[in-house]
Image (tube, rainbow, N blue to C red):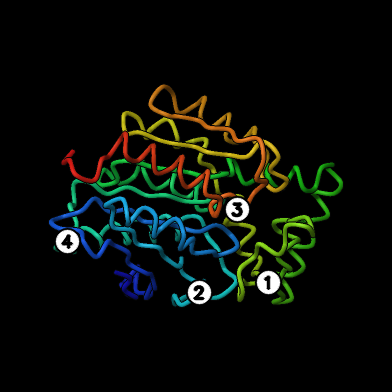
Amino acid sequence: MEEEVTFDSDGIQLAATFYKSDTAKGRLPGIVLGHGFAGARYPKMARRLADLGYAVLSIDFRGYGQSGGERGRVMAREQVSDFKNSVTYLSNRPDIDADRIGIIGSSLGGSIAIMATPEDPRIKFCVAGCPIAKGDTTFRLQYDTEAKFKAFLERVAQARAKGEKLARFEIVFIPENLRSNLPKGTPMEFSPDTVDGFLSLNPLETVSRIAPRPLFIIHAEDDHVVPVEDAQELARRAGPDCKLEIIAKGDHFIFGMDSVIDSIANWLLQHQPPGKAA
């Protein structure tokens, strides 16, 4: 079963697809699936997890896809709130076991998942794919000298003063050979506020507070958008309740890969089997 749903998040209507197996019975463990900066929904992963006995809510964060909110404005704190309000939506459904809800996020969404989980005890498990460890570090890798970084901040200030937008690749650069992975309709211009949102992104400060809840981080060694070292440092700080899996190939857009979906599915089956209450 696939159902298009909407629900409130801080006065904004979020759009999502709710997935569960047609043969599912009783109250199911729920998963909120959150996208990255590009806005992909990952239907193949959602359907696979639903077939295994999970209920999956694949959301558009505010400002993306069919959700309300200002287009081209991406703020970490607001996306944390969207995750938490998505958990509330699942908790209120009669077909969901409110004591068995977790979140999965990719790229920026993985970072947001790591930030949201410590704040909400209702979130029982967390999966992050190719997460950014710290927004400031990401910008400094892209603008890799002090002069370049200063010029970027000046460009942001000028755009703010003139009421202009910034191009997507000024904020998150994606090599040309990977740009075909961007979904149709993805925003290509962003407000200067989005840079503030990235600068406030700091899952390194929160990841140690997820324990003892289980955390799974998966990242590609050849990622050209977010370096694999981000995942390694996050896992180190997370401690023994975190599993880190580094795959050799896949670059940044790994959530559509069968092998990655299998890894996430197998981890979920181990830590939150759909047929067993927590």
Q: Which residue is mark 2?
A: 65
Residue 273 figure quarter = top left
Which comes sooner in the sequence, label 3 or label 2? 2
Q: Which residue is mark 3?
A: 198
**Which of pointers 3 and 2 indicates the residue nearer the eye?**
2
Q: Are marks 3 and 2 in contact (CB under 8 Å)?
A: no
**Which of pointers 3 and 4 indicates the residue nearer the eye?**
4
Amino acid, disc 1: Met
Pinpoint residue 176: horizontal percent, then vertical percent.
79, 60
**Which of pointers 2 and 4 indicates the residue nearer the eye?**
4
* Front residue (pair 178, 205): 178
Q: Residue at x 17, y 52 (%)?
A: 97
Dot 3, how many residues are within 10 Å of its Cα: few (below 14), some (14-19), or many (20+)? many
Label 4's element? loop
Q: Which residue is mark 4?
A: 95
* Residue furthest top in the image: 240
* Residue furthest front in the image: 23
Q: Are marks 2 and 4 in contact (CB under 8 Å)?
A: no
The CA distance from mark 3 to mark 2 is 20 Å
Q: Which residue is mark 1?
A: 188
The CA distance from mark 1 to mark 2 is 13 Å
Label 2's element? loop
Which comes sooner in the sequence, label 3 or label 4? 4
Residue 145 figure quarter = top right
Which comes sooner in the sequence, label 2 or label 4? 2
Pinpoint residue 33: horizontal percent, then vertical percent.
41, 56
Q: Residue at x 68, y 39 (%)?
A: 227
